[in-house]
Image (cartoon, helix red, strand yellow):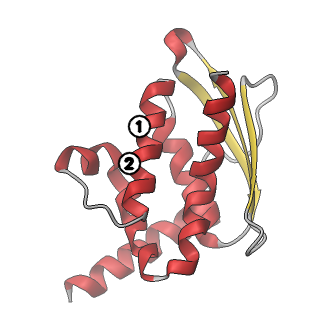
Amino acid sequence: MASESLDSLYQEIVLDHYKKPRNYGLLENAEIHSEGFNPFCGDRVVITAKLGELGTISEVGFKGEGCAISQSSASMMTEAIQSHTIEEAKKLVTVFKEMMQGKALTQVEEENLGSLTILQGVREYPVRIKCALLTWSTLQDAILELEK
């Protein structure tokens, strides 16, 4: 029963973010811009972000095409990194990727990821993990480029 309820919550959250994506649209004059593509399934995503005072991510947007998992993950990621520093965003990327690869999370890591932990359900479908990771890898690439 608990598993069914978790599956239902997973579907509800993923579909909500897919049908009503948060922060959808690209930002002009953004300091961060990166594009990602998954050649296995054709998912695409573009991330843009503006930096505010003290290096915080003041605005973030994305545009993409693809499956519900990739687009929901993008929407959820934009909410998660908003108002965080680049360093905090890097940590979120690392923890999210580790979670998707099967690492057990500490309580602090779970709290930091918040509702993103629901995407652990994707691990039941190994071929879809790359869909959930696309936006996160794209953000990681953007941060590496920014730090050059």
Residue 110's spot in the image, x, y percent? 26, 51
* Relative to 100, residue 87 above or below: above
Measured along the vertical axis of the image, is residue 14 above or below residue 138? below
Q: How many marks?
A: 2
Q: Is residue 92 visible?
A: yes
**Closer to us: 29 or 125:** 125
* For residue 106, above or below residue 69: above
Q: Could you say which is closer to the camera, residue 5 or residue 94?
A: 94
Residue at image point 74% right, 40% down: 34
Q: Mark 1 points at which residue?
A: 91
Pointer 2: what residue? 95
For the residue pair 118 and 87, the one nearer the viewer reads as 87
Rendered-image quadrant of the C terminus: top right
Residue 45 in the image, given as x and y percentages of width and height: 73, 54
Q: Are marks 1 and 2 in contact (CB under 8 Å)?
A: yes
**Place of residue 47 in the rendered image (x, y in percent of width and height, measured from the top left):** 70, 42
Residue at 29%, 87% in the rendered image: 4
- Which picture quadrant has residue 59? top right
At 73% from the left and 74% from the top, the residue drawn is 40
Q: How crowded is mark 1: few (under 14 residues within 10 Å), some or many (20 or more)?
A: some
Q: Which amino acid does label 2 sit on?
A: Val
Tell me where residue 28 sits by quadrant. top right
Q: Position of residue 9 (x, y in %)?
A: 36, 73
Residue 20 visible in the displayed image:
no
Relative depth, front residue between 108 and 28: 108
Q: Which amino acid does label 1 sit on?
A: Lys
Toward the right, the furthest residue is 28
Q: How crowded is mark 2: few (under 14 residues within 10 Å), some or many (20 or more)?
A: many
